Amino acid sequence: MKIKSGQIMIGLLAVIIGLSISVQIHSMDGDVIGGGLVPVQKAQSLAQELKEVRNEKAILVEELTNLENRIKEIEEAESKDDILIRNLVSELEKYKMISGMTDVKGPGVIVTVDDPPKEDMDYTDMSVIMYNYSLLLSLINKLNDAGAEAISINEQRIVAITEISLAGSNVNINSIPTAPPFTIKAIGNPDTLESTLNIRFGIIDQMRNSYNLQVKTQKLDEIMIPRYNDIIKFRYAVPVE
């Protein structure tokens, strides 16, 4: 008798749970995107938040640019009458360039790296260059060896804390999702940079022959490389007194 009562209770619980699930599914039906799990209202809310954050970032970037221009005006005005300040301003600009905190221009090379031709790719496979993103790191190292003074990948400035990592279906550079083709800009001696990259059995030779990647190099008299667009924070390192 006890067993029969227990079975009845289990049956009732199963019915209640089934009804609850049915009600929840019915309440979500018509409010989801393409049969997914994100309600339309929630998706719209997130999209609006993203739009607001982007607008806020654009406003802050503009404000930062205006403040930096104002500071530069003050520095130039003060340095006209003071040799010490003029020298300090010159030193400050130099260290801004070294740290990647200012836009720079100069002669150099542009390297474009893309996946193999479409007819040579299996569309079920992942992007070749994204899966082998370590080749980008090797390319940067070669440019540094050749004396590059500033480097960027897809307009992301390469600095000491830059990370290049595979994240889902993207390669993150400075935490910004990027995808091929990858355009690498480097400022330095164009002839030295190009010859270092195109040396026999070098990095570009490896990209082409071992991975069938499409790689193009171009020497230019002037290349523009943007500044690092984030804030560098030191949590542990402090100056030695």
Image (cartoon, helix red, strand yellow):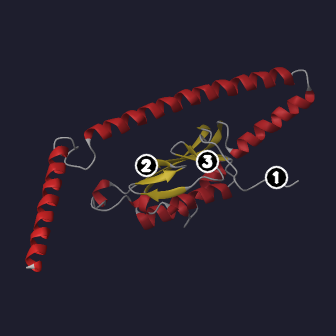
C-alpha gap between disc 3 and disc 2: 16 Å
Mark found first going from the N terminus, 3 or 1: 3
95 or 26: which is nearer to us? Answer: 26
Mark 2: which secondary structure?
loop
**Image-quadrant location for residue 100:** top right
241 or 27: which is nearer to us? Answer: 27
- Dot 1 alpha-carbon crowd within 10 angstroms: few under 14, some 14 to 19, many 20 or more: few
Residue 204 drawn above or below residue 107 = below
Q: Which amino acid type is marked by label 2?
A: Pro
Q: Which amino acid type is marked by label 1?
A: Pro
Q: Which residue is mark 3?
A: 151
Residue 217 drawn above or below residue 14 = above
Q: Which amino acid type is marked by label 3?
A: Ile
- Dot 3 alpha-carbon crowd within 10 angstroms: few under 14, some 14 to 19, many 20 or more: many
Q: Which residue ends up furthest to the front in the rendered image? A: 1
Apparent side of residue 39 relative to residue 85 in the rendered image (left or right) = left
Q: x, y percentage for residue 3? A: 11, 79
Mark 1: which secondary structure?
loop
Q: Which residue is mark 2?
A: 181
- Dot 2 alpha-carbon crowd within 10 angstroms: few under 14, some 14 to 19, many 20 or more: some
Mark found first going from the N terminus, 2 or 1: 2
Apparent side of residue 241 relative to residue 62 in the rendered image (left or right) = right
Residue 205 drawn above or below residue 228 = below
